[in-house]
């Protein structure tokens, strides 16, 4: 086993309207104000970011209560199915690090305004990276263990996966 301490320090804070409950995945047209407040000593690091349409937001899932075996999870939107944590997008992970892709709306000083983020208000920000179409969009990606009987099933299940009320 590899033993070493790894220390991350937040580079900012993520602001969302969520205090009690957040969607499972980012909801592009979600209502409310979503922005990332980067520490002022990192403002120069934002240079050129405004040219990108989407960004990766990497954050620390700081309000998670670990429960039971983290190796096996049950997706909340599929009855009677358990999968390995690494075959899921569960926030219950060995290292509570989250990743979201959101639309960059504008940057004002040290604030990056985005489309809906799937995190609680005041979540610690670890990093930001630009989303680059040819590098990050994989046309041959599949749905893995997710099973759909028809197009309606697929659309309905995807709403559950995203945590979108319907």
Image: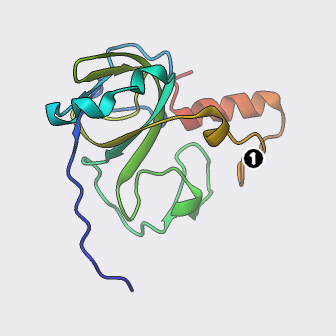
Residue 77, quarter of picture: top right
Looking at the rendered image, the quarter that the N terminus falls into is bottom left
Residue drawn at x 24%, y 72% is: 5
Q: In this view, does 61 lie above or below 56?
A: below
Residue drawn at x 36%, y 83% is: 2
Image position, residue 123 (x, y; %): 25, 38
Q: Can residue 26 be seen in this view?
A: no
Image position, residue 61 (x, y; %): 31, 48
Residue drawn at x 76%, y 39% is: 139
Label 1 packing within 10 angstroms: few (<14), some (14-19), many (20+): few
Residue 138, quarter of picture: top right
Applied colour scheme: rainbow
Q: Is residue 41 above or below residue 35?
A: below
Residue farthest to the left? 40
Residue farthest to the bottom? 1
Image position, residue 83 (x, y; %): 59, 62
Image position, residue 36 (x, y; %): 28, 28
Looking at the rendered image, the quarter that the C terminus falls into is top right
Residue that badge 1 annotates: 142
Q: On the rendered structure, is 148 left or right of 7?
A: right
Query: Viewer-proximal residue, 55 or 62?
Result: 55
Query: In what element is the residue under mark 1?
Result: loop
Query: Viewer-proximal residue, 32 or 111?
Result: 111
Residue drawn at x 57%, y 34% is: 132
Q: On the rendered structure, is 73 left or right of 13?
A: right
Q: Can residue 43 be seen in this view?
A: yes
Query: Viewer-proximal residue, 117 or 139?
Result: 139
Residue 80, quarter of picture: bottom right
Query: Viewer-proximal residue, 44 or 81?
Result: 44
């Amino acid at each position: 086993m590899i033993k070493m301490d790894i220390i991350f320090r937040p580079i900012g804070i993520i602001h969302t309207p969520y205090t009690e409950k957040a969607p499972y995945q980012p909801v592009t047209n979600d209502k409310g104000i979503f922005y990332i407040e980067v520490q002022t000593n990192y403002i120069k690091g934002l240079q050129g970011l405004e040219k990108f349409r989407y960004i990766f937001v990497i954050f620390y899932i700081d309000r998670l209560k670990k429960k039971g075996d983290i190796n096996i999870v049950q997706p909340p939107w599929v009855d009677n199915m358990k999968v390995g944590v690494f075959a899921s997008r569960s926030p219950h992970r060995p290292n509570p690090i989250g990743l979201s892709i959101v639309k960059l709306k504008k940057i004002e000083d040290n604030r990056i305004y985005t489309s809906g983020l799937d995190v609680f208000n005041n979540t610690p920000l670890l990093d930001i990276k630009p989303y680059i179409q040819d590098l990050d969009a994989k046309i041959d990606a599949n749905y893995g263990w997710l099973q759909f009987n028809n197009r309606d099933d697929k659309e309905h299940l995807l709403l559950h996966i995203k945590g979108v009320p319907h």
